[in-house]
Image (cartoon, rainbow, N blue to C red):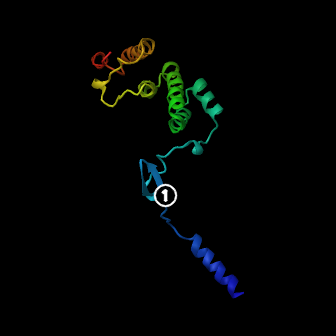
Amino acid sequence: MMNRILSLVFLICLFSCKQKAEKVQVQKGVSKEVNLKEIDSEEVRTISTMVTDYDTLINRVKKRGDVEAYYELFYSFKDCCFRESTDSVMVYSKIMAEKFNYERAYWDYYSAFLEKYHIDYSNFPQIDISKIDKKEKGKLENWFKMMIRKKLMTQQAFDSIKR
């Protein structure tokens, strides 16, 4: 009887802890410890945290321009392999931009396009698209011109791109 009571008290103590500091190994070049309490779990999105399946999300984006579905797809694609993620982001951001005029999608398409061709786009006046083949460069230039028409980009910014 005494053993049961002690076991019960031990279990209650074990599960009643309010905060549990966990350490995990994060591997980015060099392994280091990160305290999980410091990570804002609201900002972390992974494929395993997807609430809805891909087909449903894709249909919501294609048919309704659902912004939340778009974000869920966007962040899950960013977790994927490089080639597939940039191509997928480009497909769905183009739909959201052209069909539903969603402003952020114009920028997502542009950044995924440049990322696909390993072009640094962090400093706009320094963008150099001269090494992209002519057909693909034409697509990107047409995208930029559409952004100018929508007043998302200035003509001056477009002219600063090295072509």
The answer to whether residue 27 is above or below residue 105 is: below
The answer to whether residue 86 is above or below residue 50 is: above
Instruction: Name the quadrant containing residue 55.
Output: top right
Q: Quadrant of the N terminus?
A: bottom right
> According to the image, label 1 marks what residue?
24
Which residue is depicted at the point 57% across and 41% down?
47
Q: Is residue 140 left or right of residue 12?
A: left
Kind of residue sitting beneath label 1: Val
Q: Secondary structure at mark 1?
A: strand
From the viewer's side, name the closer residue of 52 and 125. Answer: 125
Residue 17 place in picture, x, y as percent: 53, 70
Which residue is depicted at the point 44% across and 24% down?
113
The answer to whether residue 40 is above or below residue 59 is: below
The answer to whether residue 160 is above or below residue 66 is: above
Label 1: few (<14), some or many (≥20) within 10 Å? few
Residue 134 place in picture, x, y as percent: 42, 12
In the rendered image, the residue lying farthest to the front is: 29
